[in-house]
Amino acid sequence: MITEQKLEEMAHNINFNSKTGEHSFFSVKEIPWHGLGTILQDYPTSAEAIQYAGLDFEVEKRPLFTLDTKMVEADNHNGLFLPSINVPDYYATVRTDTDEVLDVVGSDYHVVQNVHAFDFFDSIVGGKNGIMYETAGALGKGERIFITAKLPGYIRIGKDDLIDQYLFLTTAHDGTGSITAAFTPIRIVCNNTLNAALQTTEKAVRIRHTANAQDKLKEAHKLLGISHTLGQELKEIFNQWTKVRITDANVKRLVQLALAPNKEVLEKIYSGREESLSLQFNKKVDATLNYAFSDPTQTDPNTMGTLYGCYNAVTDAPVLDVQ
């Protein structure tokens, strides 16, 4: 049986470094729903952010070997000598601070160190009036990292609702996916919110982990242009959504569709077979609905009973990220 504590851990998936006894995450001023990591009162420099987020480690590609079982069985050295065979074209990615194996990658995979991800953000906008590091952290064993940087200005919804604008970057040391940098109105604090940002991102800079990945990062300044355009587009879309009134039943339906993890769940929702939906999925929906109908941030006229409010609930609610 999965306990509530285990479900919560699955939702945030923030790395816990057993050597330092700290969670690999930092946030500026606002305490995230999971309450982990370091909370700062001032925006850090990139060097400070790396340390506060527990990202001050490097990753190495190390050769893979397998035991020659036939020779081991015939070994006359009482187990002191274990003959091995090299595994060609495959390597393990390993954290150098903890010696944890993150995954297995191919020979053409190129490690982009965490510090280079921050260098990329530093190179986009220089000076004190540029982007500000808002959150950063590592997930799992450290195989995936994320960085959120706050941009100047806001997306204004109605008269008083101001939405922050962010650039985010995520990269993995396990061979999955590419380096992704994009604009988002979502403040990333965990696995949940990272997935939400990735799922709602249409225009992004994606770079494969190849030998010239670091050089391509330096050329990604077009993100600022993308961000300005998307910010204007979202302003128009969100303001239009504040005028679309929806019933509580429609809110539930939209939340179910937005949170559906696969086609099978979608088919059950469309066919009205809600009784066959999993307990974990229903808990996820209920948590989002509770946020949508009762959280103080959802009582504004622009959000209460509107399509925009439903969007806010899906992207902001601290739901359990389980299937």
Image (cartoon, helix red, strand yellow):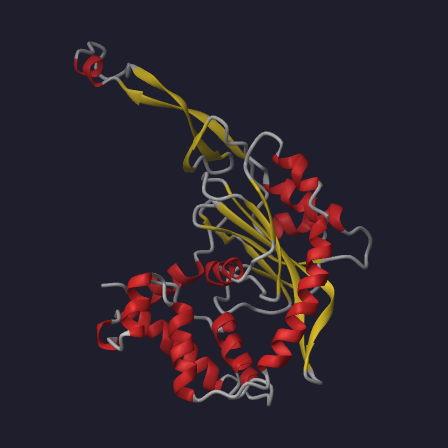
Compared with 268, 54 (above or below) is above
The foreground one among 29 and 279 is: 279
- Please name the residue shown 53% across and 62% down the image: 200
Q: Residue furthest top?
A: 76
Depth check, front residue: 9 or 145: 145
**Snapshot quadrant of residue 297:** bottom right
Kindly identify the residue that appears in the image at 69 percent across and 59 percent down.
227
Rendered position, 279 above or below 45: below
Q: Position of residue 204 (x, y in %)?
A: 60, 52
- In this image, 83 relative to 136: left or right? left
| Above or below, 30 relative to 191 | below
Determine whether, in the image, residue 135 is placed left or right of residue 74: right
Residue drawn at x 53%, y 76% is: 312
Expressed as whole percent of the image width and height from the top left, the position of residue 29 reads: 64, 68
Extreme-left residue of the structure:
73
Q: Quadrant of the N terminus?
A: bottom left
Q: Of residues 138 and 297, which is closer to you in this image?
A: 297
Q: Vertically, is 87 above or below 291?
A: above
Residue 102 coordinates in the image, percent (x, y) = 43, 39
| Residue 293 image offset from top left, x and y in percent | 46, 86
Q: Is residue 44 visible?
A: no
Q: Residue at x 58, y 80 (%)?
A: 241
